[in-house]
Image: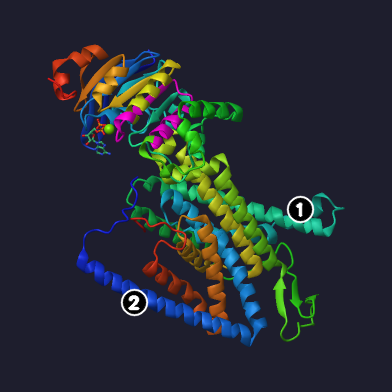
Amino acid sequence: MLLEVNDLNVFYGAIHALQGVSFSLEEGEIVTLIGANGAGKSTTLRTISGLLRSRSGHIRFRGQDISTVAAEQIVRLGISQVPEGRKIFAPLTVQENLEMGAYTRRNPAEIQASMQRVFASFPRLKERINQLGGTLSGGEQQMLAMGRALMSRPKLLLLDEPSMGLSPILTEEIFRIIKEINSQGTTILLVEQNALMALSVAQRAYVLETGSVVLQGSAAEVRDNPQVRNAYLGVG
Amino acid sequence: MQKANSSQPFMPATRKSGARLAWIGRGFLLALALLVLIVLIRSFFDNPQLFAQIAISGLQLGFVYALIALGYTMVYGIVKLINFAHGDVFMAGAFVSFFAVSHFQLHRWPAAVFPGLPPILVTIIGSLTVILLSMVVCALMAVTIERVAYKPLRNAPRIAALITAIGVSFFLEYFGALNFVFSPRFIPYQRPFGVVTWYIYDGIHLVTEGHAPPQGAITFSNIAIIIMVVSILMQLSLQFLVRRTRIGKAMRATAFDKQAAQLMGINVDRIISVTFAIGAAFAGLGGVLYAIAYPSINTLLGVLPGLKAFVAAVLGGIGSIPGAFIGALIMGQAESLTAGYISTPMRDAIAFTILIIVLLVRPTGIFGEPEKEKV
Ligand SMILES: Nc1ncnc2c1ncn2[C@@H]1O[C@H](COP(=O)(O)OP(=O)(O)O)[C@@H](O)[C@H]1O
Ligand SMILES: [Mg+2]
């Protein structure tokens, strides 16, 4: 098991945002976490990355409990996140943003090689290498955010709504790249409101509702579940 | 982090009268600027030597303020705090060098360790040691202040940290004024190296004792030159650090978005400490140079330079490093010209006049970008 989340409880003040969430990822999988706005998807990812602390429960990554590890250390362990809204460093250039993604690494030659690999996946970024992050279009910012997250060579990549605000064509492109990244050996936890797209690339899925997992199974099972079809896929 | 909303809200009536007010303000300022310019040009042609002399002392002040202002602007950029204790760190820099020189003869160590060393090398190495010591002590002091006083308030409302900063400032000033610390008196400052003065009059001549420079000569000193050169060098190396190095880029990333920086593996606490340390080291350096130039020190010596450097940072656009530098040079000239052409006591008032004008006309300063919230 690469990641195991067990009975996670997270609060914002008095708001009980995650109420005993449990799920797991095997190495090499794409797993998606779907659910309506406010269900607790981002909270889950932020807790895994160490930006939020759980009140109880465990997060185990490759067997190690990381629920009290500092955020900047979690990246070093091999978990990288593309946060909701991209969170690009607007005053830094594309290249500098990517360098920040490699902040945990020291070998310049290896960093350079990773950057070339990112450019191979996202040729648009190479064209804009000296442009400020804040001047990129939404789609380009998403590519930069993903490239930046890959620069730390993560074993597990957390993606928070990568399709948000993107055109259908760009969304297709982003999902193609998600599959490509996964095929190169990175495990992916994908949070999406675009459930149909997410279920089409994922092997397994968890459905989150007001802070609890209400349904789980293979992507096909979840897609065929009548309630899911009704609530999230707009069919039925 | 959403961008500041540049489009005006829909408020037709107030918008119109606001615009008219702004135009009156601008017209007034333009007239004021024109008046100042005319006075300056006339003064220059009346007595060019006097003007040059005043400009030189303005440069000397401005470059010291630049060293202090960088710390204000860097710290503001990263934790959005006006660190009012910064001027007192500057004061501490002067005092550390005072003790090192007067009590421990630290500036003479090369002569003691290497007896054959040429005197000029003894002076240079010894003085550099004193300056470095002051910078290091100031850096440690600022990092401690940040850890103890500001860090616990990082998620509290900003006004809480601001009031704490003022409290820390008072603490340093009046703790230092205790008799067994620095005492409240003005203490003559023993310099690590002598001040040499030259005058320009048919070439450059050394000012020697008993021979006053002739009427109309422009004088300048080695410390004035040192202050300018050092301040420019520090400014350039800071630009290099922030633009080109890994830690500098991490500082800019952290200043923009702390959580995103954490997701990169950046230790935000460490970056904040480094920022305080660099700002304080610059202030400490400024403190030593200031004391050498104006060799009488007491524990309130950082108050006015600190406030003026703060105004310089606001004038340049707080958060902007080049802005702080330019703002400081303007402040130095404004002060020196006021003292020279209006009246000496007015020199301190001009800083606050400028602050008020900046806050009224362009609160974001020269290089600042419009932002929604300000202290
Ligand atoms: N910073 C916050 N402070 C208080 N409540 C929050 C905060 N962030 C999220 N919440 C609440 O936590 C719940 C889960 O939010 P979130 O994880 O962002 O949901 P999702 O990503 O699934 O849309 C929501 O009820 C939301 O209102
Ligand atoms: Mg969300």
Above-or-below relation of B29 to A135: below
In the picture of the structure, the residue carrying the numbered disc 1 is B109
Q: Residue furthest right?
A: B116
Specify start and end residues of the magenta stretch as a single range: A140-169
A219 and A7: which is toward the camera: A219
Dot 2: what SS?
A: helix
Name the residue at 57% across, 59% down. B67
In the drawing, does residue B261 fall left or right of residue A14? right
Choose the circle earlier in sequence order: 1 or 2. 2
> Residue B353 placed where, x, y %?
43, 74
In the picture of the structure, the residue carrying the numbered disc 2 is B24
Q: Which mark is residue B255?
A: none
Q: Badge 2: how crowded within 10 Å, few (<14), some, or many (20+)?
A: few
Q: Is residue A150 magenta?
A: yes
**Amino acid at pointer 2:** Ile
> Residue B274 placed where, x, y %?
53, 45
In the drawing, does residue A24 fall left or right of residue A35? right
Q: For residue B216, which quarter of the picture?
A: bottom right
Residue at disc 1, CB closer than 8 Å to ligand 1? no
Above-or-below relation of B89 to A220: below
In the drawing, does residue B301 fall left or right of residue B30? right
